[in-house]
Amino acid sequence: MTEIMTFNGVEMSQYFRITDIIRPIGNKRTVSTDTSPFLGVNIQEIKIGAKEHKIKFDIKGKSEIEIEQLKHDLAGVFNVDKPVKITYADEPDKYYLGLPVDDISHDNITRWFQRSEITILIPDGVAHSVTDARFEEPTWNGNKMTFKINNEGNVDAYPIITIKHNSENGYVGLVSQNGAFELGSKEEADSEEYKKSEILFDYTSNTGPTRILNGFEEGKFNEAISNVQEVLDGQLEIDNAWGRPHIHLKNGTSASITWDIPADSAGEAGALYEYIWWRQIFWAGHQSQYGFMKVVVSDENGQFLYGTETFKRSNSLTTEYNFMVSDGKGGYRFLDRYTFWCTHLDSQNPFNEPRGWSDIYRKDGWIQFFWNGQYKEYNIPEIKGKKSAKVSVIFGSVGGKPGVTHVYLDDIVYRKDFVTGTRDIPNRYAMGSTVVIDNETNTVTKDGLNKNSDIVQGSHHFLSVPPGESELDIYFSSWIKKMPTVKVEFENRSL
């Protein structure tokens, strides 16, 4: 028979003709026993192991040279160091994650025709569904949301739960037939001794596909107050690379966009307690390009307070990411300085096209910066008691040299904490924030930033849902005003 197989995205029929695919029923099982006192044995442990697929195939060439080259090409395809995606035509709704093991045996029928066999190890032991199961219509009862789940596989599935908050929340609790999992704190209060948070401007894509365009229209150009004197003689524009809008330097030495921090609901302007989240891209097209991008905050007196700069100032891929604060004397100082390579690779650049998230959290004279998966905290007496008034983003070139190809602002949101007039507190999960609990990878993120630190100590470490029909209950803070929008997705997995 002839069957179609893909390995790591490569259609294998271009290399050989499959004659048989042997997929055993189920998996290897190991049973540990000890002697029973009277009859039989006692079972101590049952382990279900990996799968093994055996692929039998023929290789045919027009000449000895051609068939040997085919074997070299095939060895290159199979040269992987981790499990890769494998599909078979007779299982169009499933895929496997596997890699070759042992020797690829073969029989030389003739010099131009060989018969071979390869063993594929499936380490996780399951077939994965090509299409995820999705559940988006729960029932509500108070602060509890219940999903009726149908796992059509025959082993546990690991759900990815996406929670978009429609109001503030301090707690998420998950309960399934297989365990429980908690984030935040049940005791986190909403209206006792603390004040509430307010989003004073929000130009983020998760609130609408063109929000950054609104920010571009509402901002003021070339009025930024930076840590140094900037030559703000340029223009900004909207760039639509990768199918989404970004703010970008069009021309000139440098240019900026500034947003006044609006008065809060109590009519009070300025802030000592605030949070800024943004998404920036900084990706050079060539190492000879130069440029910078700054996200800075200034006070009511027109003085620089704090911010970050992303700066490429050399003919190399090395790029700086620096934390800056006022020195209290009209100048500034660096708190920390980091470097990265401004390429397209995740392993080298936290500001490449699919990523770029960052944030700053301030509580008067205390400030927290984010860098590449970690938070850094500092006490800054120079800014204590000085209210923020403006947030600016500055784009710049360096000495007439070619500019960096992709220097963009994609999203920015500003939250003011401890707003006067109420006793609401700035809760862990602000309105508009998105929490993703990924039980496949054992990670929790909030707005793209890792939040595994929110997992309650002693909580069952991530969840699974059993085969068949079951329920998944999700609990939120008792005082939540509006239930979040929640989506549950998972792959059906089969032995």
Image: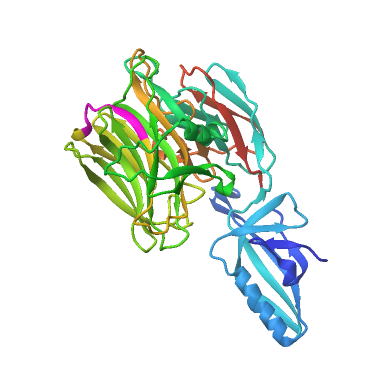
x and y percentages locating residue 20 in the rendered image: 77, 66
* Region of the chain picked out in magenta, as a range: 383-391
x and y percentages locating residue 336 in the rendered image: 26, 47
* Horizontal side, residue 164 vs residue 366: left or right: right
Seen in the picture, residue 219 relative to 33 is either above or below; the reply is above
The colour scheme used here is rainbow
Residue at horizontal 52 percent and vertical 40 percent from the top: 438
* Horizontal side, residue 231 vs residue 109: left or right: left
Q: Nearer the viewer, residue 326 or 6?
A: 326
Residue furthest to the front in view is: 233
Residue furthest to the left in view is: 329
* Horizontal side, residue 45 vs residue 455: left or right: right
Whether residue 288 is in magenta: the answer is: no
Quarter of the image that includes the N terminus: bottom right
Can residue 179 be seen here? The reply is no
Seen in the picture, residue 22 relative to 251 is either above or below; the reply is below
Can residue 19 be seen here? The reply is yes
Q: Nearer the viewer, residue 449 or 461?
A: 449
Residue at horizontal 54 percent and vertical 42 percent from the top: 245
Whether residue 387 is in magenta: the answer is: yes
x and y percentages locating residue 391 in the rendered image: 36, 33
